[in-house]
Structure formats: structure tokens, C-alpha cells
Image (cartoon, rainbow, N blue to C red):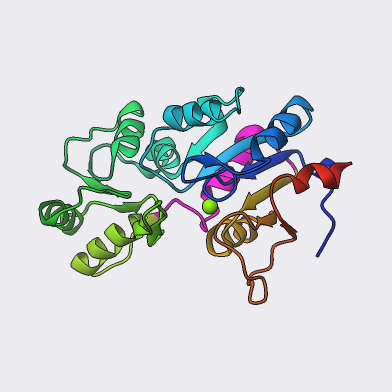
Amino acid sequence: MSELRLEDYDLLLIDLDGVVWLRNEPIAGAVETLNRIHDGEKIEIRFVTNNSTRHRKEVAETLRRIGIRWAEQYHVITSASTLADLSSVIGIERCFIVGEQGLLMELEEEGVDIGGKGDVCVGMDRNFNYQKLTTALRNILAGGLFLATNEDRTFPTPDGPIPGAGSMVSAISGACGRPPDIVIGKPNPIMFLRISIQTGAKRPLVIGDRIETDVLGALRAGMDSALVLTGAAKDLREVKPRPKYVLRSLRDLLKSGE
Ligand SMILES: [Mg+2]
């Protein structure tokens, strides 16, 4: 495994769950580390999450509350904000949403008519039901695009996992007989590539706790990755694909730069 030198990078693409916080509680050392890197003013930091349920503004508020005081909406990129950001590229004018407030607000802010006709935009939805499944099916059969924020099968909570966006996507796929036309979230590289273009970064580093989303997404984007062991990944014997670096926690970022 390589030795990480922070000065080799100009952009950190940092996952949230299992890296910065766990169950809304900050992970030891994460806040101080991120503040010190930010104060160094040499490296851009962006938080990249598949979670589509909350608007970026709300995520930034949570980041400030745990002590990352400089966090603004533009530091946060979610699968929902990216889908909304790409709505004009994809050609989404009207849509039916299976999803929560974050996805709804992001699409509405981009001027998409969320009245229920047209394409189908799918994220995690804790009020998913048979009626929504029926509407999604009929819209897709009528020619609507099937757009998924992400395909995470589960979502971690203090009481154990709950069905994630991937469960809603699978139900709709099962009904209409085909996979989504576009999936925005990791391991697809769309978010990583888009942020790199927008920031003009030349040497981004992806940091996350999941092999199957963060590390694989980095590989697909052609970027280096660092796996942190404060979240999902614990056992490194069967790790594929391999991250370039393994960190016990975000704190190791500073040790490597000194
Ligand atoms: Mg994570």
C-alpha cells in the first residue's frame, strides 16, 4: 500500500456516512482534521454522498453543527443535487418522484415540474407504497425515463439497516422489466467527474468507507482512492478493487502530510 502525501492532491472528495460521522455523531478526529486541511488553503474539500433524502443546505447545517464551521451548501454534493443539476442535460422537464424532501426540493429548484407526469426520479422513500409503484410503472411504460439517484440496497440506522434507494429501484425495475436508464450515485463516476470539472481540479482523491461505492467509483472515474476503516469496511483480506491507500481514520491524512 502506498504512502499518502496530501500535497500530491488538490481536491478531496469525501464521503460522509462512516467517514465524517456515524449515526449523526462525528467520528473521532474527523472535524479537527478537516478544519486543519481547510485552514491550510491548499486543497479543495467537497462532501459527496449517495443519500438523496436531505437537501444540501440541511447537510451543510449538520456539518456546521458538528464543528465544520466553514461548510456551505456548495461544499456538499448529493445524488439528488446531481440529478437535478443534470436535469437539463438529460432533458427532464416533468417528473414523478419516488423519494423524500431532498430530491423533491433539488428538482423543483432546477425548475422541473414535479407534478407527477413524465420521467420517474427515484431515491430512498420511507413512504414508498403500491400506489407510487403503480404510477412509476405507468409513467415508464408511457415512455418516461427511469432515473435513479443511487442503488444502495440498505441504509444504516442506529436500530439496524433499513431499505435504501436500491430497494425502491428494484421494485420499479421488477414491475417495468428493465433496469434504470441512468444511475447517478456511486459507484457511477458522474458525481466525482462533475465536481472535478467544476472545481478545475487536476489531482482529486476520493475518500470513503465502502469498497463497492467509493473505491469502485474512484476507479471508474480514473481517480486515486483512500479507504477509511471507521465505517463499513473492516476486513481488508478480500478487498477488490484495491484502494491506493488505507487509513485508520481521517486523522491519518495529517500524519501523512507531516
Ligand atoms: Mg459511507
Asked whether 241 falls inside the magenta stretch, the response is no
Asked whether 190 falls inside the magenta stretch, the response is yes
Q: Position of residue 8 (x, y in %)?
A: 83, 45
Q: Position of residue 192 (x, y in %)?
A: 58, 47
- Between residue 172 and residue 154, name the one nearer to us: 154
Tell me the residue at 42%/46% (across/down).
51
Q: On the picture, is 163 further left or further right than 10?
A: left
Above or below for 99 versus 33: below
Residue lying furthest bottom in this view?
238
Q: Position of residue 164 (x, y in %)?
A: 35, 56
Q: On the picture, is 147 further left or further right than 188?
A: left
Tell me the residue at 16%/41% (across/down).
116
Tell me the residue at 75%/30% (across/down).
36
Q: On the picture, is 181 further left or further right than 64?
A: left
Q: Position of residue 242 (x, y in %)?
A: 68, 68
- Between residue 169 and residue 234, name the one nearer to us: 234
The quarter of the rendered structure image containing the C terminus is top right
Q: Which residues are magenta?
A: 183-202
Tell me the residue at 29%/33% (across/down).
112
Number of numbered discs on residues: 0
- Between residue 44 and residue 236, name the one nearer to us: 236
Residue 172 shows in this picture: yes
Residue lying furthest right in this view?
258
Above or below for 212 versus 144: below
Q: Quadrant of residue 175?
A: bottom left
Q: Quadrant of residue 251?
A: top right
